[in-house]
Amino acid sequence: MTKDEIIDLARQSGFRRDMFGLGIWDQEEFINFANLVASKERDRCAKELDRLDYWYSASSIRKLK
């Protein structure tokens, strides 16, 4: 993933900055971020397996969601 993609996922999970420019995370936001990253990586891996024509492995990865 690119830096911009990671920043976008952090924003989607609810990450925000306080008035001092420091990041604010609570447990729920961190869990949401981890789930978004894991989902993105599963999709990336499944697409690569599709490209290599390993359809069985790709479908197994997609079922992990």
Image (cartoon, rainbow, N blue to C red):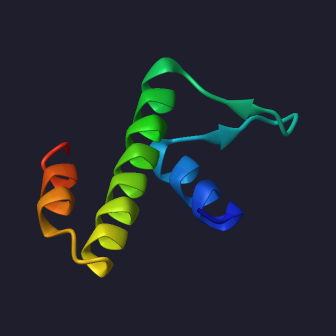
**Residue shown at the point (60%, 55%) measured from the top left:** 6
Q: Nearer the viewer, residue 4 or 60?
A: 60
**Quarter holding the N terminus?**
bottom right
Horizontal relation, residue 38 to residue 52: left or right: right
**Residue shown at the point (66%, 66%) measured from the top left:** 4
Q: Nearer the viewer, residue 60 or 32?
A: 60
Give how far across and how far down residue 62 sits, in percent.
18, 55
Quadrant of residue 3 within the rendered picture: bottom right
Quadrant of residue 17 within the rendered picture: top right
Quadrant of residue 52 within the rendered picture: bottom left
**Quarter holding the C terminus?**
top left
Horizontal relation, residue 30 to residue 2: left or right: left
Query: Residue extending furthest top?
Result: 27
**Residue shown at the point (59%, 40%) measured from the top left:** 15
Q: Nearer the viewer, residue 15 or 59?
A: 59
Give how far across and how far down residue 13 sits, in percent.
47, 44
**Residue shown at the point (30%, 68%) measured from the top left:** 49
Q: Nearer the viewer, residue 26 or 64?
A: 64
Vertical placement of residue 11 versus 55, above or below: above
Vertical placement of residue 48 versus 8, above or below: below
Vertical placement of residue 46 versus 14, above or below: below
Give how far across and how far down residue 64 sits, in percent.
19, 42
Vertical placement of residue 34 versus 3, above or below: above
Horizontal relation, residue 1 to residue 44: left or right: right
